[in-house]
Amino acid sequence: MGEGSGPLTSTHGEPAFDGTSGRWVGVSVPRREDPRLLRGRGRFVGDIELPGMLHAAFVRAPIAHARITSVDLSAVFDVDGVVAAFTAGDLALGDIVALLQRPPEEFVPTAMPVLAREKVRFVGEPVAVVVARDPYAAEDGLEAAVVEYEDLGAVVDERSAFADGAPLVHDEAPGNVLLDVSMFDTAGVDEAFAAADRDGCVVDITTRSGRQNALPLETRGVVASWDDHDDQLLVQTCTQVPHQVRTMLARSVGLAECAVRVTVPDMGGGFGQKCVVGREEIAVAAVAKRLGAPVKWIEDRSEALTAAFLAREQRYRTRAAFDGRGRITALDVDVVCDMGAYSCYPFTAGIEPLMASAEMPGVYRVPAYRVHARAMTSNKAPTAPYRGVSRPQYVMAMERVMDRAACELGLDPVEIRRRNVITEFPYTGVNNVTYDPGTYRESLDLAEAVLRDEGWYEVRDAAPADQRCIGIGYACFSERTGYGSDAFAQRKMEVVPGFDISEIRMDTSGSVVVTSGTMNHGQSHETTLAQLVADRLGLPIEKIKLRQGDTERIAYGWGTFASRSATIGGSAVATAAGRLGDLLCTIGAHLLETRDDNVRLDGAGGVVRLDDPAQRVSYEEIADVAYLRSHLLPKDVEPTLTATASFDVPGDGTFSNATHAVVVELDRGTGKVEILRYACAEDCGVVIHPQVVDGQCRGGIAQGIAGALFEEITYADNGEPSAASFIDYLVPTATEIPDVSITHLETPSALTENGAKGVGEGGTIGAPAAVLNAINDALRHTGVALDTTPVHPEAVLAALDSARIGAEDDV
């Protein structure tokens, strides 16, 4: 697509499925999950009750960085209802270790013990586990545990981590750095900055984002039991990555993987926090095996806020060179990501800085690029890849750069973006990433048109600054979705995610069961993946059942993260369904006494002859032969109707894109930020289920607004976290989240089987930048720029007061 060309498709409405068109994709059919969940028939980890089940609770460190001098659990056994208690030495479990295949000067691996040994490295780190007959007795048992510590001094921020003589979180990580990479330093960077000093402008900006909790509605939890009959450990847990949990758990406990079965019931959200392997799940499983009894642990909200995997705390110093026409000529970036106390498995502490380094140029043509990125360790809970994974942060940096450059060059903020966005595809960037076709310019134009057509520019410009402070902000971004093995391998991970596998099986009734290695935690997989199968086979979705989250049923799967479910998982499902269709045609042709190339699926549950459509055989008739009268099958066809397929996105993957446009008003008396209008123009390729896509966009935008204006966990100098409940951790409610209008563009991906690109993370990526730019536009008369999120009301009020005081001084 060349510059100025229009979108391939714009979704202005959606068709109704009429049962004869044979197309389910693109239709908002009723969600198959809803009846079960709305009627209270969902089954979550917290709902699981087993005979003789015990309950676990964890003794947690009250200090951020200390040597453990003694652990005395003797009094715990005197507590009524307590059955057992264990330290790290008692369980003797293997550590959780995530590795990158990088030299020691670039990456330092760290071992995360399941229970802390010798040292604790953050407040809330598990030191011992108490097991009792009910959760209340287990909590009482915690009070009886006596642990003594020797304080070692805490590292809580970049300044303290990099200071001379700072305490080392890990002795093996000098300078408290876990990863230090300079992935790009292309020719021409310094020359571009020298030229920009003469004829254009140089923007130098430092942006920061606060530490957040992904905050799934359902906290982490596990029920583990040992099956003497099968000699197998059954672990029922809420995870996005059941096979990775099985792998790490088996290694830690010392079992063959076939002796561990991980299943996932319904799950109430994950957002990335549950796509890494946790310590508590392994400890509970080990205890269940040791005691020969089912053991349950449900994380309470205080634990979730302080000791679960956190995310987002990053700092970017971004220098950008622009020529006199507003074209960016070079980018020079220094990135520091606070990854907390340990590397997460399997992604390691490198996931955030490596993501930022590889993809920061984003939707813009950047001729020269230099980046230095570090993952620092600190005495805070470790981080996991929360929805978006560095992209909200580097997009915020890039979008602030664009607005600042527009101001210095006297250009409209939208116009400077038009001059820099990628418009010709495929495009290989300075970061060696090839971007497949998208609608970067088109989404920008559409988003701007919404605000102009609705008159928001007139509202902003007509408002006297001393009465109403209204601002408009934009964010343009792309999202690499469905990372395949090639893309993950570029990070030099020892564990390389990528492919997905699907098996589909038709029974004698003509119904099918399809498996997927992806994991549903609110994305409507039971509906959308069934739509893909229904299209391929011409079946009503009521005859299609999805199976996920069982390591015994799925050969291997990487789970759900990085917007991979529709792109990779959906492609594997669609391919498997297509192969089953081919098998049905082969058998159908034999039964119709014709050639294989003279039949087709009729879209209504049968196979017909092309030369005589009156001759037809139904799926039920074919299945009857395949299972019950297999002697009638073609000689080279085996019994049963089963097909399997794997899928892996090649190369650099496929890219969704979007533009977010925001209008805000600042309250001059309180500093409160009110969002008056929020518009999103997005392109995720083929839209499988429009309402689901809209829900993904709106949910992501809500989380992005939360990061821009509300949510943050801060720490005292001693490493004590500020938020142990929702009293301290400010979460937006429905009243703070505006209505969001969404316009869909559709550029089908040539790299996926179904034309879809991912949509799971995009809303979260664009919202912080768009909101922050709108706030700064509203503050344009003050001369103050805010470059840190979340934006607190006191910061806004201080900026407004500085303008008022300046005006009074002028008088």
Image (cartoon, rainbow, N blue to C red):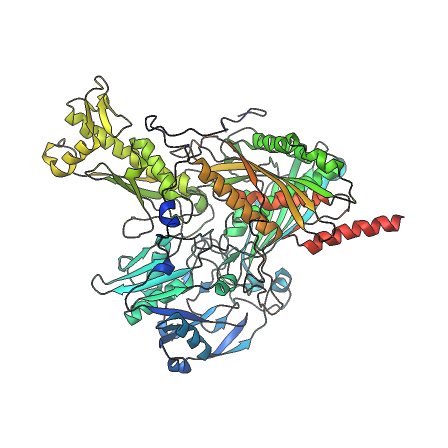
Q: Nearer the viewer, residue 194 or 94?
A: 94
Using the rendered image of the protein, determine whether residue 196 is visible from the camera's viewpoint: no
On screen, residue 220 versus residue 509, left or right, reads right
Q: Residue at x 20, y 38 (%)?
A: 509
Residue 155 or residue 430, whichever sits in front: 155
Is 376 situated above or below 365?
below
- Residue 453 in the image: state x and y as whole percent: 64, 30
Q: Please state which of residues 628 and 676 is positioned toward the viewer in this rendering.
A: 676
Where is residue 62? Give x, y as percent.
Answer: 53, 72
State left or right for residue 736 relative to residue 672: left
Residue that sits furthest to the left in the current view: 631
Answer with the quarter of the image where residue 287 lies. bottom left
Q: Judge whether 745 appears above or below 485 on screen.
A: above
Q: How many marks?
A: 0
> Farthest residue toward the top?
611
Residue 613: quarter of image: top left
Q: Nearer the viewer, residue 204 or 793?
A: 793
Residue 149's x, y, as percent?
52, 77
On the rendered structure, is 393 left or right of 58?
right
**Residue 541 left/right relative to 717:** left
- Look at 73% across and 39% down and name the residue there: 407
Q: Of all residues shown, which one is farthest toward the right? A: 811
Residue 122 appears anywhere in the view: yes
Residue 144 x/y as whole percent = 44, 79
